[in-house]
Amino acid sequence: MLVSGLVLKIRRKYVIALDSNGYVIKIKIGSLTPLIGEIYHGTFLETKPSGYYFRKYKTPVLIITFIITISLIICSYLYYTPTTTVYIEASAQVTLSINRYNKVVKAIALNSEGDKLLTSVRVKGTTLDESLNILYDGAIKNRIIDQYFAEAKQIYRVNIDSEANIDITSFLNTIKSSPYIIHINNKGNVIYNSQYK
């Protein structure tokens, strides 16, 4: 269909023009390139209606969005589901929930001393080994375990409830020179048992 209009913009293969009815239209450029402001006659280029590409790619976009959403839900479920529980007991009592990637996802104080300890340190997001070291050092710095704790022969207990193999070698190296009585067990199996020094 041949149309004519006042040239507003020039593109490589077409011009944008204003026709006699006031509509903005696209006209295919022939052999001569027009100038802006000139009346140009040529073949009308049909434009795609708004939303054309969305309608064309709607199904693949929705499928990809659905897959990404489901993947994020599954990943967050796997990350935030605890598989191991650690109960730490001295005068402060703290429970740690550990996920399958050996990261602390939740730390709960069971008494006021435990609350004091957890407000002074940050264990969420650390590994089990790091969190045990952080809590032990925090308990010493906050005087939750001190010389009176040792003289009274109180026990610093770490009870781990895990089916998986746990790696707490750094914590074990830290407590070897400790003056406190420390008991560590996993489901009743003794991992470490120190006596009063």
Image: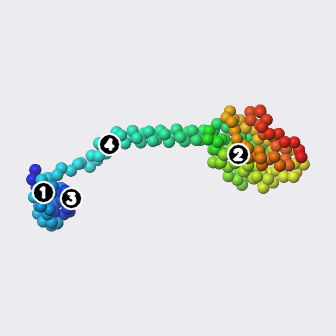
From the viewer's perspective, is residue 182 above or below residue 138?
A: above
> Residue 60 location, x and y as percent?
36, 40
Between disc 2 and disc 4, whose residue precedes? 4
Numbered tag placed on residue 12 in the rendering: 3
Numbered tag placed on residue 197 in the rendering: none
**Amino acid type, label 4:** Tyr
**Amino acid type, label 1:** Gly
Mark 4, Cα crowd under 10 Å, few <14 / some 14-19 / many 20+, is: few
> Residue 29 location, x and y as percent?
15, 57
> Marks 1 and 2, how far apart in space?
75 Å
Q: Which residue is mark 2?
A: 129
> Marks 2 and 4, how far apart in space?
49 Å
**Is mark 1 in CB contact (under 8 Å) with mark 4?**
no
**With 148 as the anchor, is 116 left or right in this view?**
left
> Residue 61 location, x and y as percent?
37, 42
**Amino acid type, label 2:** Asp
Please give the name of the residue rendered at 82% of the width and 39% of the height, measured from the top-left corner.
Answer: 193
Please give the name of the residue rendered at 79% of the width and 41% of the height, measured from the top-left corner.
Answer: 157
Q: Which residue is mark 4?
A: 57
Label 1 element class: loop
**Amino acid type, label 3:** Arg
> Marks 3 and 1, how far apart in space?
11 Å
